[in-house]
Amino acid sequence: MLKRLHLRNFTVFEDADFAFGPGLNVLVGANGTGKSHVLKAGYALARHLHETLGEKDLHWFNSGNISSPLYDLLKVFRPIPFEGSQLIRRGMGEYKATITLGLVFSGGDVETTIELPINQELFLVSDASASELKWLNKKDETIAVASSVFIPAKEAITLGWLLPLYDRREIPIDETYPDLLRLLMGPPLRQPEPAHIVAQLQQLIGGKVEEEGGHFYLAAPEQPRMEMNLVAEGVRKFATLYKLLANGTLTPETTLFWDEPDTNFNPALLKEMAAVLTQLAKAGFQIILATHSLFLLKELHILARQEKQPVRYFGLSAEPGGATTVATADNLELLPDIVALDAELDQSDRFQRVLDQEDADRN
């Protein structure tokens, strides 16, 4: 489970600390305040720890040093030029940035920090000035760092052709897309869990998701299967979630990062999405998502009260030219600077004034 993410002089953040809860975590804020950057930074470092440590004896890295996650960070962010200096906040006095990631799992609590210097032209894995691993609480002598899952804002389940091309050629696309495609591959489990959520998703998409030759299909009962290109984009997002659960990739041990699950959803489907996310959190899944949708925020707030399933909210805001600041609340009503709410309330007021004027003109 991702416990903490601290960003210092990183992209739009001067000094921001995120203390994530075990269930549903929601980032909200205006465009350009760094919501996607939070998800990508957390994902890149968590993924690096999984690939570096996997299942190992604690004595293997008691020295505290691990290989640098900088190259993984660059592949996920894909800055141009491909340099660590591009990830350092503009206009600050110090010429370095740090990211600290805190994880909790069966082996104990662990924290890793990467430091990005700015005084080099090109930053490769060995060039990061610091990359440390610190144990905060050891519980046993072995660890098992689970993988993480990142679902980008643009759907990827129709991009099966991208994976072999990406593996062979230099393509300017961030690594979250091929990463997700790799996780979507593979046959389904005989008994995927949680069974009730898998069944709920299957009903929403109208069948099962099958993969053949790198292409994904919707297989409905007594119907010819349909390639995902022909399926509505909102349904494809449910299909992506279904496939990750069906093949056992997404489990309560993983952290799901989801950038704008509300994209291309109508309110009826958003209501269903909120219900699925709440049920996943209730089943022990940690989810960290970013959204612009007030409808989704309201639905999650309603379900949090009805299901007694807490949601942690992070409000990101920034003055013109200033660094992004973060406000944290466990109640949506207590979160300041909700841009989506302010914009919708303003629209409601303007709409009512237009209706009032039309009534006055008719009379």
Image (spheres, rainbow, N blue to C red):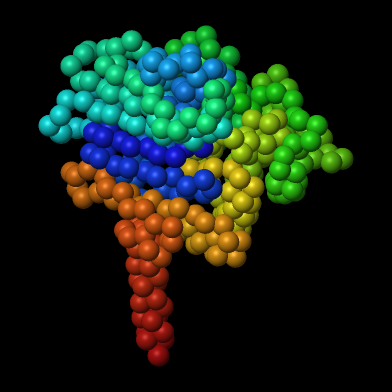
Residue at the (21%, 25%) spot, across then down: 96
**What is the x, y in percent for residue 34?**
33, 40
Name the quadrant containing residue 344: bottom left
**Residue 331's image quarter?**
bottom left
Residue in the picture at 54% in, 17% down: 57
Q: Is residue 9 visible?
A: yes
| Camera-nearest residue between 263 and 333 | 333
Where residue 258 appears, x then y in whole percent?
A: 50, 40
Relative horizontal placement of residue 30, taking residue 239 as reference (left or right): left
Report the number of numbered marks.
0
Q: Nearer the viewer, residue 28 or 142?
A: 142
- Left or right placement of residue 177 versus residue 226 in this view: left
Q: Residue furthest left?
A: 93
Residue 309 position in % (x across, y down): 56, 57
- In the rendered view, does 93 fall on the left or right side of 152? left
- Would residue 78 appear left or right of 308 to someone viewing this image? left
Q: Residue at x 38, y 67 (%)?
A: 345
Residue 206 % position (x, y): 75, 45
- Taking depth in this image into account, of 105 and 185 the one nearest to the observer is 105
**In the image as oriented, which residue stretches furthest toward the right?**
222
